Image (tube, grey):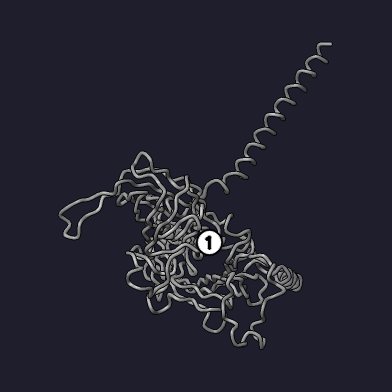
């Protein structure tokens, strides 16, 4: 009886333990399901975000005039053409009387207004930047670039966009103003998640002579972060490897970027690839890809080229397989332990990225202005390439086990798919010797020994 009781207690204890483990696993799974959608985090750019700042500059009889400034604080992710789109919902029944430096895509129903008609009466206005070359009286500082914003790490002066709004039927003091809500940012596609507007200390401005400070009457910020999971269910680029010590080329994984465009792709040597108008983009930015086994718009190739006594050299090539898109001010981010000792980069600009002070293993490559900062559409000119000379650290340098290849690669801020580690070009050694030749040598040796006997 005592044995039965002890067995029963042991069984119940085991059952409780299993139940606790299942609950823990369920909670972990739930966190992983929620986190990618709730907030975005990039380990190579932990502080990267786009901050939208509203500065109330003056009060009007029925509202306020505000300067809206968008700052791209992402080190290597920029907003390409056709540019950003910003929308929000008004807290009350506000209207936009006028805008300078930007415009809404729709006016909405303004039929209840007589005389002065507002610029936009929609509850949820959608705003876009103006194009270059608009009349001077419609321009505002840092406006009118077609919504294109450079990455902070590449060109801080071009990473800002701004416009001015005159808001009516709104509060006319700090206490009566209601902050807009439900901010949405497209850049130009999905991927950004914006938090709620938060009142912050008023922005301080310096006069042109820098002898006097003024400040906004009220300021609030909205922070938007990027998630590749939200932007695309598949990667948008892949990586291939090769080396001087092995004839094998490790290609991009098959269908690395999904093969949904396989039926509509164009063969590189076909008549269609030379057809007039093939490079004309579509309004919805639908890609037209060259037929490849990986079906990625972008391929990054890393080649270990030369091994010197104190240095080694790698070649980097970026190829565009999209006939309908070129990439202006592209960026390429590589994580590799030897990037802490870069001696020279040829034909690319280079900037080390040090998000964590104690680790210097990440760098950003980008094109030289007016030389190769434009990656052309798929075809004979759709590639850019460079070489990197790195000084060896004799304590860590190795050509074994794929050490010479990158740990992570990003193109235009999106992480590229790497090949499986077991397919990397290996360093030839005795472990990979041909077993047939070893057996032949052993047989020959045995015959010699027998003949000597």
Residue 154 position by quadrant: bottom left
Judge by depth and name the residue closer to the eye, 66 or 312: 66
Q: Residue at x 58, y 66 (%)?
A: 238
Q: For residue 309, say whether it is visible.
A: no
Q: Residue at x 69, y 75 (%)?
A: 264
Q: Is residue 171 above or below residue 360?
A: above
Q: Residue at x 66, y 88 (%)?
A: 271
Residue 82 in percent (x, y) is at: 50, 69
**Quadrant in which the C terminus is drawn:** bottom right
Judge by depth and name the residue closer to the eye, 173 or 390: 173
Residue 87 in percent (x, y) is at: 49, 56
Give left or right: position of 265 versus 88.
right
Residue 296 in percent (x, y) is at: 61, 69
Judge by depth and name the residue closer to the eye, 141 or 137: 137
Give left or right: position of 235 versus 169.
right
The residue at the far front in this view is 114
Q: Is residue 389 above or below residue 213?
A: below
Q: Residue at x 61, y 71 (%)?
A: 286
Crowding near pointer 1: few (<14 within 10 Å), some, many (20+)? many
Judge by depth and name the residue closer to the eye, 200 or 299: 200
Residue 440 position by quadrant: bottom right
Residue 175 in percent (x, y) is at: 36, 38
Q: Secondary structure at mark 1?
A: strand
Residue 267 position by quadrant: bottom right
Residue indicated by mark 1: 414
Give left or right: position of 270 versus 343.
right
């Amino acid at each position: 009886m005592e044995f039965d009781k002890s067995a029963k207690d042991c069984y119940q204890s085991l059952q409780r333990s299993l139940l606790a483990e299942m609950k823990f696993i369920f909670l972990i799974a739930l966190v992983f399901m929620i986190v990618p959608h709730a907030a975005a985090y990039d380990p190579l750019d932990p502080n990267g975000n786009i901050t939208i700042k509203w500065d109330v500059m003056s009060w009007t009889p029925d509202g306020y005039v505000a300067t809206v400034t968008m700052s791209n604080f992402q080190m290597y992710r920029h907003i390409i053409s056709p540019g950003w789109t910003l929308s929000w919902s008004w807290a009350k029944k506000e209207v936009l009387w006028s805008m300078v430096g930007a415009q809404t895509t729709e006016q909405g129903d303004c039929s209840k207004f007589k005389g002065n008609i507002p610029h936009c009466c929609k509850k949820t206005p959608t705003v876009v930047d103006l194009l270059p070359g608009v009349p001077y009286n419609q321009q505002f500082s840092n406006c009118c670039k077609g919504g294109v914003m450079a990455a902070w790490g590449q060109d801080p002066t071009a990473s800002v966009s701004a416009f001015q709004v005159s808001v009516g039927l709104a509060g006319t003091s700090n206490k009566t103003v209601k902050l807009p809500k439900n901010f949405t940012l497209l850049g130009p596609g999905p991927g950004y998640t914006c938090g709620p507007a938060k009142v912050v200390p008023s922005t301080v401005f310096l006069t042109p002579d820098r002898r006097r400070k003024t400040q906004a009457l009220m300021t609030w910020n909205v922070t938007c972060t990027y998630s590749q999971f939200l932007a695309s269910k598949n990667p948008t680029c892949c990586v291939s490897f090769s080396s001087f010590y092995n004839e094998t080329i490790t290609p991009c994984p098959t269908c690395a970027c999904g093969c949904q465009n396989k039926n509509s792709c164009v063969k590189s040597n076909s008549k269609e690839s030379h057809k007039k108008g093939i490079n004309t983009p579509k309004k919805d930015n639908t890609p037209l890809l060259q037929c490849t086994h990986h079906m990625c718009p972008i391929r990054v190739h890393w080649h270990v080229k030369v091994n010197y006594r104190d240095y080694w050299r790698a070649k980097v090539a970026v190829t565009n397989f999209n006939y309908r898109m070129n990439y202006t001010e592209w960026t390429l981010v590589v994580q590799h332990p030897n990037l802490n000792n870069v001696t020279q980069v040829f034909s690319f600009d280079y900037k080390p990225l040090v998000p964590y002070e104690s680790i210097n293993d990440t760098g950003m490559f980008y094109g030289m202005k007016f030389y190769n900062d434009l990656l052309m559409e798929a075809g004979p000119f759709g590639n850019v390439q460079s070489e990197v000379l790195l000084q060896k650290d004799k304590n860590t340098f190795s050509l074994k086990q794929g050490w010479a290849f990158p740990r992570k690669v990003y193109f235009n801020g999106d992480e590229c798919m790497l090949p499986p580690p077991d397919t990397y070009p290996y360093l030839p050694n005795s472990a990979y010797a041909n077993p047939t030749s070893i057996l032949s040598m052993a047989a020959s040796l045995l015959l010699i020994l027998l003949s000597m006997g």
